[in-house]
Image (spheres, rainbow, N blue to C red):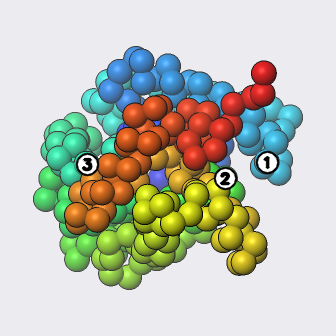
Amino acid sequence: MTDIRKVAVLGTGVLGSQIAFQTAFSGFAVTSYDISEEALTHARERFAGLVQTYEKDVPGAAGGKAAHALKRITLSSDLAAAVADADLVIEAVPEVLKIKQALYANLAHLAPEKTIFATNSSTLLPSDLKSSTGRPDRFLALHFANSIWKFNTAEVMGTDETDPAVFDRLIEFASAIGMVPIPVHKEKAGYVLNSLLVPFLNAAASLAAGGYADPHDIDKVWRIATGAPMGPFQIYDVVGLTTPYNILLHGDEHARSLAAWLKENYIDSGKLGIATGEGFYSYKPAD
């Protein structure tokens, strides 16, 4: 049982919209924030798509329950209004340190003293951001996997200043929205999931960018040889290519070369993954 009732989710991208919808689907009042009305228009489209996905894939979601979740979501491009009475703010904005730091510096003045801040950052440590929050004792990471209705882990990781009671409240909240909480006992870049996943995806990109094998054949050998349901490039398409690109761009020389390969061959052509209908695979309906 959690005492968190009102949740603000900042960012309406692929994962931000999923977090907001899953939270509303679980019975919580949610404010979904993004920086412009244009972004919120895309958010409405994502939420409508999630209703259909939940009705198809989530037991008990049909018969109006998934559609009813939309009534618990308020969309806003006014940050002050979005966080005015929030018990919890979950930040899911782009993986760029300066963007996140600026957002938290603003939030520190706008959110009530009671509000807990949680970052969904995939790669940055909470300690990279805590000094910007104005409340390091009520700040930690709450990291979700993509397709959270299906891959329902929630990694909870604090800093050396996070109040243990706040950590426990986030564990309870994660359970309350249908996640399996994974406590991470000390800070680790990439948490548990991405500490395993990122080197795997980078290895696949190195093989393809180096001309050793085509992405589809790399996926094929992985699926056949391991029994895995998806290969690395199918996972890239699910995650979306923008996030891996941003991560690689801030890496070493080899990582930056992989970022350039993604950009030149896919991103510049609008091939960003499932969300845009094409990435390493095409998801557009046949004519």
Tell which residue pokes out farthest to the right in this image. 63
Q: Which residue is mark 1?
A: 57
Viewer-closest of 255 and 16: 255
Q: CA distance from mark 1 to mark 3?
A: 33 Å
Viewer-closest of 253 and 212: 212
The three-letter code of the residue at mark 3 reads Val
Contact between marks 2 and 1 (CB within 8 A): the answer is yes
- Residue 83 x %, y %: 34, 36
Q: Is residue 273 above or below residue 128?
A: above
Q: Which residue is mark 3?
A: 96
- Residue 210 x %, y %: 43, 63
Q: Quadrant of the N terminus?
A: bottom right
Q: Which residue is mark 2?
A: 149
Is tag 3's residue or tag 2's residue first in the polypeptide sequence?
A: 3
The three-letter code of the residue at mark 2 reads Trp
Left or right of 30: which side holds 151? Answer: right
